[in-house]
Amino acid sequence: MDLRKITLNIILLTGIICPIHTFSQTLSPKGFKKKLMIEQGVLIDVRTPAEFNDERIEGAVNMNVKDSLFEQQVKKLDKTNAYFLYCGIGKRGDKALKIMEHEGFTRVYNLKGGLAEWKKKGYKTNTNKLY
């Protein structure tokens, strides 16, 4: 075997034995807040614009997972960033996490229990109307 074949076999075996792992997960409010501070990722509220307008976590941007353009918006994001998702109770955040994983994102975190659990744990939200 020549050196190129040996190198190719090593690369192929490494990919099989050590596949690329995603680090996506659902985190408690405490873990979510801590990880967000450490990784300084993008905080995304996946609820509707009306819900986002009423109340949100400070610093969040809104990308409605129910919008037909959500997947197109996701494809425009930088896959090297960490993304922190939340919704009302965690279900839409989980849906968005799965979509992002499918698109190849590896560092996506969903807030367990959503904004409801965040507030229940005493963390602040912004209720100033945007429009």
Image (tube, rainbow, N blue to C red):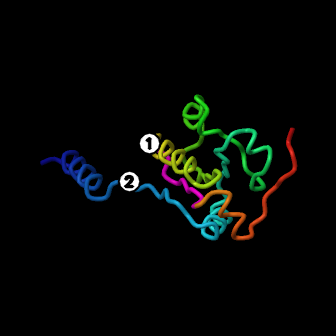
| Count of marks overlaid on the render | 2
| Residue at the spot of label 1 | 102
The magenta-colored residue range is: 104-112
Q: Residue 20 got which mark?
A: 2
Using residue 3 as the reference point, say whether residue 100 is left or right of it: right
At which x and y percent is residue 30? Answer: 64, 70
Task: Determine the secondary structure under disc 2.
Answer: loop
Q: Is 55 situated left or right of 18 in this image?
A: right
Tell me the SS state at disc 1.
helix
Answer whether residue 109 is magenta in the image. Answer: yes
Tell me where residue 99 appears, x and y as whole percent: 49, 42
In front here: 124 or 116? Answer: 116
Quarter of the rendering containing residue 39: bottom right
Q: Residues within 10 Å of mark 2 (few under 14, many from 20)?
A: few
Q: Tell me how far mark 1 sits from mark 2, CA to CA.
A: 13 Å
Q: Amino acid at mark 1?
A: His
